[in-house]
Image (tube, rainbow, N blue to C red):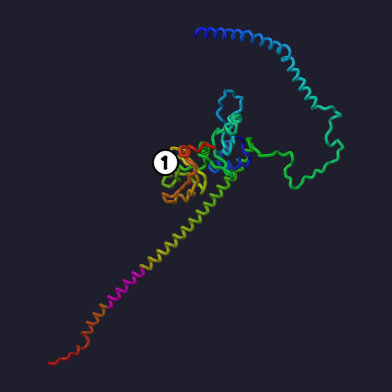
Amino acid sequence: MRPLTDTETKTLFTKLAHYTGRSLNNLLTDTAPSTTTTPTSQPDRYVFRIQKDRVYYVRESLANLATSIARDSLLSLGTCLGKFTKTGKFRLHITALDVLAPHARYKVWVKANGEMPFLYGGHVVKAHVGRWSEDVPEHQGVVVMSMSDTPLGFGVTARSTGEARRLDPTGIVTFRQADVGEYLREEDTLFTT
Amino acid sequence: MAPTTAKTGSAKGGKGASKRSTKPSTSSSSLKGKKAGSAKPTSKPSQLKTKSASTSTKKKKPPHMRYTEKELKVPQLNGIRPAGVLKPPNAKKGKNFVDDKDSMNAILAMVMAEKEGNIESKMMRARQLEEVREARKLEAEKRAESKKAGFEERKQDIKEHKKKRQVTVGDAVADEARESKFSKMAKKPKKRVSFG
């Protein structure tokens, strides 16, 4: 387990910024709710750590404690954001949704009849869209929400909002990238390294 | 059999217990006493003090020993760095980790600016394309309308023309009939041949 290098940090942030707005800054400034009663101790900030090829968003104190565990034995810690491919690209995992969703720039709300098709791994079609953010460009990362504002996953827009308006009801509006159904579908492989 | 074994066990245990109770107490006390009395409290701090003192003296050399490399009249070595060597020899090897908040913020700001620019340009392009598309659509609509109007006009034209023709043809027939009537009256009676 080690901190990220500068190129890795840039790659990671570029990917995260694809889905989030300016509030991504909060990821760095956020602090864990203090468990200790002593006011003098510094608040615990969050850091990014890479273990094998996976990147974790983890409390600094936890990351420091984890140094006492051998690299081979350390399976996981904190929140897994995704993994670096062999070619140096970064792939976001569904586990990153909790980190992404509060800072999302663009969102697509899916109607109740479209939730299950999406959770089974389907793309979002126009007929299932309840509403969407305005002025979304093409191929932009969006967070998919249910109508009750529960994040269901994330994807990439197939068309810009203007073009999507003219689309027929069966046309794909958002290409799925990850959905919470993966917790069940990919149960065996999601947390193995 | 059983009671004897029990007895022996108990006896052994008792002996063992007594031994344990007596021996360790004496030994430990004696050891402790020796250690405490002789070495520990007095020697350790003194050693520490001497160590710190020695390190401080090691750092501070006497004035005649204080000199730098330049002051030694040593001939200068060839300090030219070969063209192929980019890194200085004492530079950090391996990966450059980013763990402090400031450098992370700097990277994030750079990335965000880039992303914002990208999105902005994408939106601008999308808007321009949309405008062009709208204009083209309007033009096409106008053209279609004009075409339709022309077609309608032509249709109307043809319809009117047909009506006119019908009217003219009908008039001609009526006129002829009328004319024939008058002409019959006016004209000589038809020549008749009778074989009577």
- The residue drawn where x is 40% and y is 63% is B148
Q: Is residue B38 magenta?
A: no
Residue marked by disc 1: A116
Q: Nearer the viewer, residue A162 or A157?
A: A157
Residue A84 vertical position relative to residue B61 in the rendered view, above or below:
below
Q: Position of residue B70 (x, y in %)?
A: 84, 37
Judged left or right of residue B89, residue B106 is left
- The residue drawn where x is 52% and y is 7% is B4
Q: Position of residue B63 (x, y in %)?
A: 85, 28
Q: Would you say residue B133 is visible in this rendering?
A: yes
Q: Residues within 10 Å of mark 1 (few under 14, many from 20)?
A: few
Location of the C terminus of chain B (image quadrant): bottom left
Question: What residue span does the magenta drawing correspond to?
Answer: B156-172
Q: Nearer the viewer, residue B139 or B86?
A: B86
- The residue drawn where x is 72% and y is 15% is B40
Q: Residue furthest left?
A: B196
Q: Position of residue B58 (x, y in %)?
A: 80, 26
Residue B75 vertical position relative to residue B41 in the rendered view, above or below:
below
Q: Residue furthest bottom?
A: B195
Q: Quadrant of residue B105?
A: top right
Judged left or right of residue B155, residue B9 is right
Residue type at mark 1: give it: Met
Judged left or right of residue B119, residue B82 is right
> Subunit of mark 1?
A
Residue B100 vertical position relative to residue A129 in the rendered view, above or below:
above
Principal SS element in the magenta part?
A: helix
How many numbered marks appear? Answer: 1
Q: Position of residue B86 (x, y in %)?
A: 73, 45
Q: Nearer the viewer, residue A123 or B176?
A: A123
